[in-house]
Image: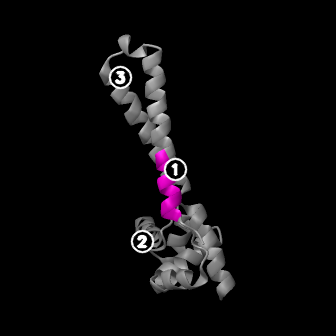
Amino acid sequence: MSYPILKTSLKIGIATALAIILFQVSNIFLVYKYFKFDYYITAVAVVFLVAGFFISKYKRPDKINNETNKDLISNLTARELAILQLIAEGKSNKEIAAINYVEVSTIKTHINNIYAKLGLQNRREAVSWGKKLIELD
C-alpha cells in the first residue's frame, strides 16, 4: 500500500531540516555579517521557487488506468476526437485545418480544449493519447 501524503510530508520535512542546517552552518561561519538579511530572504525564495518547479514538473499523477482514460476520452466531442487522431498521425495544425475546412485558429482552440480535458501539456503527450485511442478502436 502506498502512502503518498506520508512520502510528501517526509520530503518536505527533510527539505526543511536541510534548510535549518544550512542556516546554522552559515551562522557558524559568520556569513550573516557580510550579507544583508534581504539577500537571505531572496535566496530562500529562489530555492523554494526552483524546488516547486521541479516538484510540479516531475510529480504529476499517472494516467495509466484504462477506465479513467475512457472517462476522459468520453468528455471529448466528435470533432476533438477527430483532431486528436489527426494529431496522432503527425499532421500539422495547418494540415488539420485544411482537412476540416476551418481556420488554423479554430484548430488551435480545439487542441487547447483537448489539452485541458485530458490534462495534457504538449503535443507529444497528445500524440501518445491519440495513438492509445487508435489502438482502442
Residue at image x 42%, y 13%? 30
Q: Residue at x 54, y 71 (%)?
A: 96
Q: CA distance from mark 1 to mark 2?
A: 34 Å
Q: Residues within 10 Å of mark 2 (few under 14, many from 20)?
A: some
Q: Few, some or many C-alpha atoms within 10 Å of disc 1 (few <14, some 14-19, many ≥20)?
A: few
* Three-letter code, disc 1: Lys
**Residue 10 visible to the viewer:** yes
Residue 27 horizontal side relative to residue 131, left or right: left
66 to 122, vertically: above or below: below
Give the labeled residue for mark 1. Answer: 11
Q: Which residues are magenta?
A: 4-13
Q: Report the residue that reaches farthest toward the right.
A: 135
Q: Earlier in the sequence, mark 3 or mark 2?
A: 3
Which x, y percent locates residue 66? 60, 82
How many marks can you see? 3
- Callouts 1 and 2 close, C-beta under 8 Å: no
Secondary-structure class at tag 3: helix
Q: Earlier in the sequence, mark 1 or mark 2?
A: 1
Structural distance between the alpha carbons of marks 1 and 3: 25 Å
Disc 3: which residue: 39
